[in-house]
Image (cartoon, helix red, strand yellow):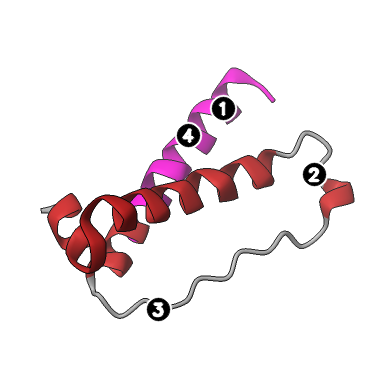
Amino acid sequence: MSSVSNVLARQHLEVLEALLDLVMASGKVRVVDVAELCPPLDPDQATARVAARLIHRMVSAQAQWGDTGWQKAVS
């Protein structure tokens, strides 16, 4: 992946994380399902790493602050 592609991917991930924060701050999320559609097409496991990063973000906030964690984390 070129350096330009890396920068764009990082920016997209930052936007996705911001959207995740907003959705989680609603307090309405009770279940999250993460799936990879086609592992053979992801030989460097990039989508698996993104999924792990997003799951870590959700679980860490929940563990640190409990049910109201997202409101405190994004305030």
Q: On the picture, is 32 further left or further right than 40? A: left
Label 4 to label 1: alpha-carbon separation: 6 Å
Q: CA distance from mark 3 to mark 4?
A: 27 Å
Q: Nearer the viewer, mark 1 or mark 2?
A: 2
Q: What residue sits right under mark 3 in the picture?
A: 30
Per the image, the residue denoted by label 1 is: 6
- Whether tag 4 and tag 1 are in contact, CB under 8 A, the answer is yes
Residue mark closest to the camera, 2 vs 4:
2
Query: CA separation, marks 1 and 2?
Result: 16 Å
Lower sequence index among marks 1 and 2 = 1
Outermost residue toward the right in this view = 40
Mark 3: few/some/many CA within 10 Å (<14, 14-19, 20+): few
Which sits in the foreground, 22 or 28?
28
**Disc 4 residue type (three-letter):** Arg
**Can you identify the residue that label 4 sits on?**
10
| Quadrant occupied by the N terminus | top right
Q: Main secondary structure of the magenta part?
A: helix
Stretch in magenta: 1-19
- Amino acid type assigned to the residue bearing label 2 in the image: Asp
- Given this view, does label 2 or label 3 mark the residue nearer the observer? 3
Q: Earlier in the sequence, mark 2 or mark 3?
A: 3
The disc, 3 or 1, on the residue closer to the chain's N-terminal end is: 1
**How many residues crowd around disc 4 within 10 Å: few (fewer than 14), some, or many (20 or more)?**
few
- Determine the residue positioned at 72% across, 59% down: 36
Q: Nearer the viewer, mark 3 or mark 1?
A: 3
Q: CA distance from mark 2 to mark 4?
A: 17 Å
Q: Find residue 38 and report its image quarter.
A: bottom right
